Image (cartoon, rainbow, N blue to C red):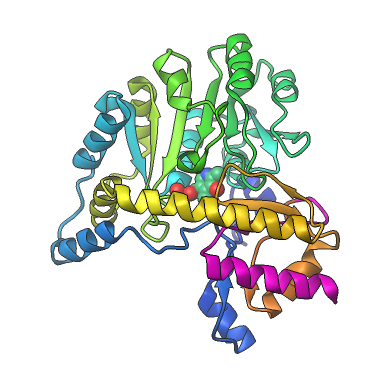
Amino acid sequence: EIKVRSCLDSLAVYQPGKPIEEVKRELGLEDIVKLASNENPLGPSPRAMAAVAAAVSQMNFYPDGSAYRLRAALAARLGVEFDAVIVGNGSNELVQMLSLALLEPGDEVVMPVPTFPRYEPLARLMGAVPVEVPLKDFRIDIEAMAARVGPKTKMIYLCNPNNPTGTIATRQEVDWLLERLDPAVLVVFDEAYFEYVTHPDYPDGLDYYRRGYNVMVLRTFSKMYGLAGLRVGYGVGSPRLVGYLNRVREPFNVNALAQEAALAALEDEEFVTLTKKTNEEGKRFLYQAFGARGIPYVPTEANFIFFDAGRDERVIFRRMLAEGVIIRGGFGYPTHLRVTIGTAAQNARFVAAIEKVLAE
Ligand code: PMP
């Protein structure tokens, strides 16, 4: 018999979006479109690709464990102290580090549901209690979240924009929350889709950091910068908090190629501009396509759209897969699925497939 920690009984293995190669093999189809993981449809930043190619010959060496150049570049770019920046093996790893550093058995972690699905298991892993607060009209219900904060609350997750709905908590709502919250409670802003937002009432989590609130801001190179496969994200918080995260951090958590790629991608303004433009055009195209077919959707501030197929989402997922289009369901809404905004060709392919599937 294998004896493991009892909290593992309540943990499932994370099921990522199906890899394209696997679907190709299963279906015997060559032409597959993956719009399931909010990846950048344009590929990686070209500058990042060149930087990786140049760094390959150095990969016999350990990476810089302190990620000095990348953190310095981020600190300069964001206008924060060097010691306030930490990098992770994807922002996923920063969620894990926060859990390891902050959570004791019995602590409570307030989070919306549905949201990014790693906050909940990483709280459980520490023996902490996830307090899941349902969305209201597909948006984080700030008042309900505040009402669930109690003496055992250690942290609150604000996924902003929220995944899978693409909605934002506004500046006014976040101001209201932070003004009344016990300063001992850490507010984690997960801003994985920060760079896509165009809404004027969107609050930049860093403003709260600068104003001295107890917050941690998480961002990533996986989306706007096209580096999901390399795994690099970053966090900004008080140097004291970052110091504690460094105690639980693996010494070489971000690999050498990822550090070089991230540094180059950060400078690749052309790629960022093109990604934003592609996303805005794709958003307009999909809104129009959904509207014309009477498919309800949630207006998004990110690079994906949550829509109501009107039928069992599990069935829709399978039928779309059979059409060679991978999207994502399983978010706890019986008829909603999430589609990543792709290139014009990918979006057209998605629309043709959803039209066919809904007509069946
Ligand atoms: N947070 C949110 C809200 C996300 O959607 C994702 C990626 N799906 C992540 C964090 C993790 O991103 P990464 O680990 O690739 O930086």
Residue 223 visible, this orientation: no
In this rendering, position of residue 121 left or right of residue 309 = left
Locate the C terminus and report the quarter of the image it occupies.
Answer: bottom right
In-image side of 236 versus 57 (left or right): right
Which residue corresponds to the image point at 26% horizontal and 50% vertical from the top-left?
Answer: 259
**In which quadrant of the rendered image does the N terminus lie?**
bottom right
Residue 170 seen in this snapshot: yes
Q: 241 or 2: nearer the eye?
A: 241
Q: Position of residue 175 (x, y in %)?
A: 58, 16
| Residue 220 found in image quarter | top left
Image x and y of residue 261, in percent: 27, 54
Residue drawn at 38 percent across, 37 percent down: 248
Report if residue 334 lies within the magenta region.
yes
Report x, y in % for residue 301: 58, 41
Residue 168, above or below 16: above
Task: Give the quarter of the image for residue 346.
Answer: bottom right
Region in magenta: 332-360
Does residue 206 appear left or right of residue 280 in this picture? Answer: left
On the rendered structure, is 356 left or right of 251? right
Q: Residue at x 54, y 30 (%)?
A: 103
Q: Nearer the viewer, residue 186 or 290?
A: 290
When the figure is inspected, residue 90 is found, relative to residue 108, above or below; the finding is: below
**Percent of width and height locating residue 156:** 60, 27
Count of picture labels? 0
Residue at 27%, 23% in the rendered image? 81
